[in-house]
Image (cartoon, rainbow, N blue to C red):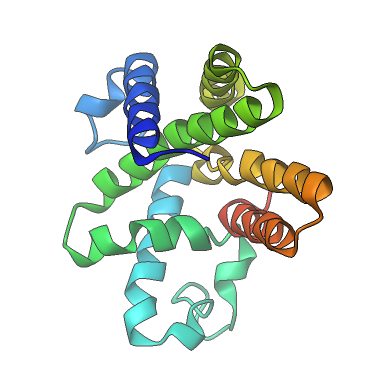
Amino acid sequence: RVTAREFTLLVLGFSALTIALTWPQIIRLDSVADLGDPLFSIWRIAWISHQLPRHPLALFDTNQFYPEPLTLTYSDSLVVPGLMSAPFFWMGDHPVVIYNLLLLSGFVLSGVAMFLLVRALTGRVDTALIGGAIFALYPYRYEHYSHLELEMTMWMPLALLGLHRTLASGRLRDGLATGFAFALQTLSSLYY
């Protein structure tokens, strides 16, 4: 189990590490790495925040290729990242800033999640910090810096943690948590 204090320290620590290793992104939150995939990702998460309060049952029926149905499914739909960012769109924050904060949160939350998995498996905080840092900032992330969905890996370690707990305890709630984390990963990035 993780305490609120420990979680806060982990988020702050992995945030500092992410800021240092993605510098100067944090001071350029109003710009994107390129004008291809980031703009497409902004449109997808913005669509989710737009459609949810208006017609949630038609979430996948976008204005892209209208009148074709289910066009959000033509690519990775980013449902969970869209839900994570929707309140910021509703508050009127700038879409590019929202995208960049969501992108960077993928690094941070992936590190925190891997820390939790490694600590549960080894019982060691030092090993968990190293494992979390490696998972949060491994070079593959920089090769795909423009692909929001490929930065959303935080649910995989949690699914594995749930699976380990399920196998060890046989409890239904651990099995359900595993399935929930797996579903969150699938709805964050179909590639994984």
Where residue 9 sits: x, y (%)?
34, 27
Number of residue marks: 0
Looking at the image, which is closer to me, 52 or 179?
179
Q: Is residue 33 above or below residue 47?
A: above
In the image: residue 116, left or right of residue 103: right
Residue 121 is at least partly visible in this image: yes
Looking at the image, which is closer to me, 80 or 113?
113
Where residue 153 sits: x, y (%)?
58, 40
Q: Residue at x 40, y 24 (%)?
A: 14
Q: Residue at x 44, y 76 (%)?
A: 63
Q: Is residue 8 above or below residue 18?
A: below
- Quadrant hosting residue 160: top right
Residue 44 is at least partly visible in this image: no
Q: Residue at x 63, y 65 (%)?
A: 74
Q: Is residue 62 above or below residue 154?
A: below
The quarter in which the C terminus is drawn is top right
In the image: residue 174, left or right of residue 155: right
In the image: residue 9, left or right of residue 68: left
Where residue 60 sits: x, y (%)?
53, 76
Q: Residue at x 41, y 63 (%)?
A: 83
In the image: residue 137, left or right of residue 164: left
Q: Is residue 156 above or below residue 43?
A: above
Where residue 70 sits: x, y (%)?
59, 78
